[in-house]
Amino acid sequence: MDTTKETRTMAKTCQAPCDIFHESDKVICKLEMPGVSKDSLEVKVDGDRLIIDGRKPAHDTKGEYRIREIRTGDYHQEFTIDDTVDRNKIDASIKNGVVTISLGLRESEKPRKIQISSS
Amino acid sequence: MALIKWKNRDLYDPWADFKSLQDEINALFDIDRVPTTTGLFDRSVSPAIDVIEDEHTYTVVCELPGMNEKDIDVSIASNVLTIKGEKKNEREEKKGSYYKKESWSGSFQRTLPLPASVNGDKISAQLKDGVLSVVLPKKEEAKPKQISVNIS
């Protein structure tokens, strides 16, 4: 049955603004997910996919909206990662609504200096 | 019991392709992730806000990811609420190259005229997980009152 698949695609998600930069030995991915706390964030690696899910807290709909500009829907982002990323060196942290994921590169991918020996 | 129209999923649906094309075009215009200026003469970006009114308060919610309390300035002057501050880019001077940059940085300001019923002395604000909530209580006389009428 593909019902689960269908509900997942129909669920409203939004993409978070994302910065990706390359440092000497790692790639840092920063996502702005305001409203997401440590408990409502889920980061997982599934084969070649890096999946980031963040749930926004449901606002108590006691009152009425007078202005509504903030997008609703949970955050969902998927990235493809290749073999240069060491699967054991993936770290994630969250602070003030900004998720930082550090993807460590394999030793073989790092720039290496070759010593020149004089004979 | 709900009746659902039977649909043969094995049949090729030519409209499904149009749907995905439409989604792709919509994604091109999906630029409201980055806040823009709202006014004609605004020089700084305006982050998105929500204003929720209930019986006793107005709540202003503003998304400011990656910011600390000290970077945000919330003030009220003659019934105009101003949220301003500067969002710093932490990585400006560090080494490395960007593959992708979608986040914004720089100063921002958002002003909001408040209704006269707001009690300006009892405003509280808190920042949690990058979301700023400003709670503006209403004045006592503006709250709905229940008056019981005795019918004799």
Image: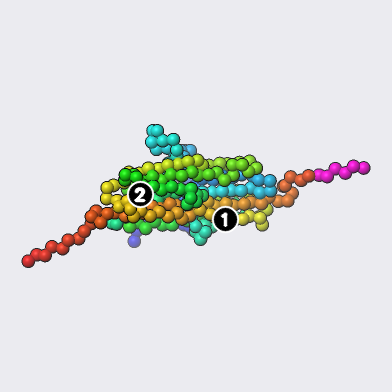
Give the residue displayed 90% in from the left and 42% down from the top: A118
Give the x, y percent position of residue B53: 31, 52
Residue A115 included in the magenta stretch of the image: yes
Alpha carbons under labels 2 and 1: distance apart: 30 Å
Q: Quick one: SS at disc 1?
A: strand
Q: Chain of mark 1?
A: A
Magenta range is A114-119
**Quadrant showing the N terminus of chain B:** bottom left
Depth check, front residue: A48 or A100: A100
Residue indicated by mark 1: A93
- Of all residues, the one furthest to the top in this rendering is B40
Please name the predominant secondary structure of the magenta segment in the image.
loop
Residue indicated by mark 2: B51
**Amino acid at pointer 2:** Val
Q: Chain of mark 2?
A: B
Give the residue displayed 36% in from the left and 47% down from the top: B76
